[in-house]
Amino acid sequence: MIEFERFELSNGLKVLFHRDKTTPMAVVNTLYDVGARDEFEEKTGFAHLFEHLMFGGSVNIPDFDGPLQRAGGESNAFTSNDITNYFNHVPAQNIETPLWLESDRMLSLAFTEKSLEVQRQVVIEEFKQRYLNQPYGDVWLNLRPLAYKKHPYKWATIGKDISHIVDATMDDVRSFFKKYYHPNNAILCIAGNFESNYIHDKVSYWYRDIPKKLKPARIISSEPPQNDYRELILERNVPADAFYYAFKMSHRKSFEYYIADLLSDALGREKSSRLYNKLKKELNLVSEISSYITGSLDEGLLIISGKMNNGVNLEKLDKELWQELEAFLGKPMPQIEIDKLNIKIRTAREFQDQGLLNRAMNLCHYELLGDAAAINEDINVYQSITTENMLEVGKAILQKKNCSLLKIIRKNT
Amino acid sequence: MNRSEAPKLKQTEHISIIAPKISSKFPVPFYYMKEVPNATSRLELYFNAGTIHGKIGLASVVSGLLLSGTKDMNSTEIHTKLDNLGAYTDVSIVHESVIITLYGLNDHLTEISSLYINSLSNTDFKQNEIDELLADRKQKLKINFEKVSFLAQREFTKNLFFKSKYGRVIEEQDYDFLTREEIIDFHTAHYLKGLYKVVLVGDFSESKVVKMQDLLSPLCVAKFPSFPNKLMNKAGRFSVPKERALQTAIRIGRIMFTRRHPDYIPFVILNTILGDYFGSRLMSNLREEKGYTYGINSMISEHLNTGYFFIATEVAAEHKESALKEICLELKKLQTELVESNELELVKNYLLGQLLKSADGPYAMTDLFVHLQNYGQDIDYYNQYIHEINEISAEKLLLCAKKYLNWDDLTIVTAG
């Protein structure tokens, strides 16, 4: 059970406080309700580029990291298609330092040309390091636009194209900040061994004078139902053929989301899973195979991906995979198998909850979904899933007209 | 309110660590941390089965076959049983050991352990399982050959641990020379009598701990293994070509020492200033000032009797030479200019804060303590650590840099 308190400042900042009496450390986590899905199609990669600029100094403090490191702490952030999340880990006695720093950069950034120029270069190098200069690195740059035709999930967080990063201007930076970076669009979580009054006082002191703004309306093109099987073949300089089956699945707040998550576990999470057994151990077609979900807030993807054994072609796999999926959906899943999946989820959760940072991040995440208290509920949601649920959702998701297949094949050199 | 004024700081002055207990009734070191406030638990087993043993590739292949099946259970049955208990397992291999880690809820960990150990002890190494693993490994190796970071790391390993078993790197055809007999012999020598350290974390009754000890004791080594205490890197510049690479991977480093050495703590501080935190000189210069790279780090790593230091980065291909020049300049600067008090103060505070973080919670405390024990040290070491950090002078750091950061002593590798 993760306990927490919630309060809100008059400028709209939602604050969560989680007390842990055993730790000498503290975490300050800030979630901004903006991600790559909020970008314009002609200016992608911007939410992430902006995340880099948040470390380039704020209106009253020239350097973000230095003072935090001087306080014995450290900081980082990540951007997804849905959110941007900033976190600080600091010895508890210096909790005020991250509050000072975070509140100042929520108030306003420094907006220096130098910071924009350098971070533009850094992000371009990140683009190369992660997506372009790696075998199979550009898979998601191609799979997303295959699976999504309208919804902004069709581009990756890093951006659709390097040129979008190259062309970003200071005006873009300013207007992005104005629209998304303010108390009414943020959730703050403090975790550590503090008295509740103290946190109320300190948060209020540092954040209350940040002006209130309207929460930006989110206008996102929804993805039309798929109803057609899609396939894309790319030739690349890679040693092994690879496959990525992407099936549309439900959004984060639905019960079906949990079922799809469990389905992906059943198919290909572990070495005891269905596809691993059939396609690797029994038929020896693939060197690796796994299944997972993208975990996005809007309609997401259930992925089955892997690499082929030398000398086996993708058509053979395709045939066997669909046969196995059909067999899987032809019979109700034994309860013992559902129990197996659930105990893995429960164990993983217990371990994740060990970390103070994890707890703080998850509280913000659940608050964004509607209620931080759900952090203690979703294990029960998984436990409530029945054999019938699995079959029903499995049949809805795992069908050809709901599937986009990306094949990466070896270039003949 | 004056927003340009930083809140007052309080430095970390001490850390409180609860040390795990050391069991006296076990043939090899057995550490047990009982103070866990929740249902999680972990068993870590150290086997004398690292990559320095046997033919090239052999140790790694055997470590991949530990759950490949016994006379009575095939690998799928073993994994299904483990998953039914909610187990997460991990096998990691380094030069000097194989570390098997079992995670589970404490209700299940004894059963998980007994299933795992039973499978590991009775593995019968079926030829089809061996063939499957070898094919997978070959494919992984081919994929890795497409990565500049892998190519650089490989060339670096060869020259950092020059002319020693630590410096061996595998070629694809090496996998063709491993036989089932060799695999079985390695398993017998390095696992069935290879356990040399156990670390248990979790709230267990006395009888459960004894049960686990009974399960493990047949696997213990007769004599605690010994490892070399002298390695030498081959200094100089090495480059690995990779056509059409957008980035060049760089690895630069040298052989150092363990924490038993009197210069260890000064070198930790020096390394932090150079490249071991976000505000480090290398990050500030190559990333935040020039935008050559997404990231650059320097690190210290320890074996049981030796250690090494290295810098790692991937830079834009067109900036390779400028990046090397800047790295060299940063090392020279540490050798010729005293670190300013402002920067030194920051790094001291940062290191103390990180120490506090690295001792947060029963798992972290156990890891910290067990690592110290490798070098015959006790918790008291951290009092000395805090003291030395507080006392360190810029002059001492300069001497340390002069001694250990000469460009000509370093192994410098680029791939791209």
Image (cartoon, rainbow, N blue to C red):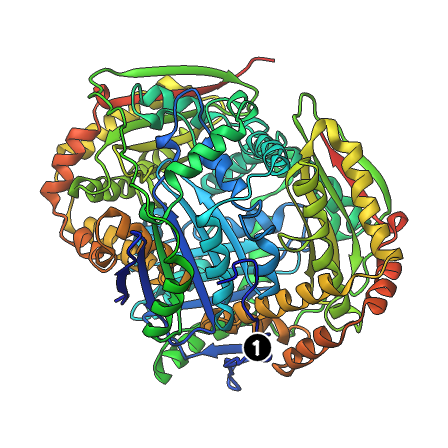
Q: Nearer the viewer, residue B138 or A101?
A: A101
Residue B353 at x, y percent in the picture: 58, 68
Q: Is residue B44 above or below residue B18?
A: above
Residue A257 at x, y percent in the picture: 21, 41
* Residue drawn at x 40%, y 81% as measured from the top left: B210
Whether residue A225 is visible here, answered yes or no, is: yes
Whether residue B123 is visible here, answered yes or no, is: no
Q: Residue furthest toward the bottom?
A: B24
Residue A246 at x, y percent in the picture: 32, 27
* Residue drawn at x 30%, y 16% as measured from the top left: A230
Residue at image mark 1: B28
Q: Is residue B123 above or below residue B356?
A: above
Q: Nearer the viewer, residue A127 or B164?
A: A127
Q: Nearer the viewer, residue B111 or A191?
A: A191
A262 relative position to B149: left or right: left
B178 relative position to A273: left or right: right
Q: Residue furthest toward the left?
A: A388
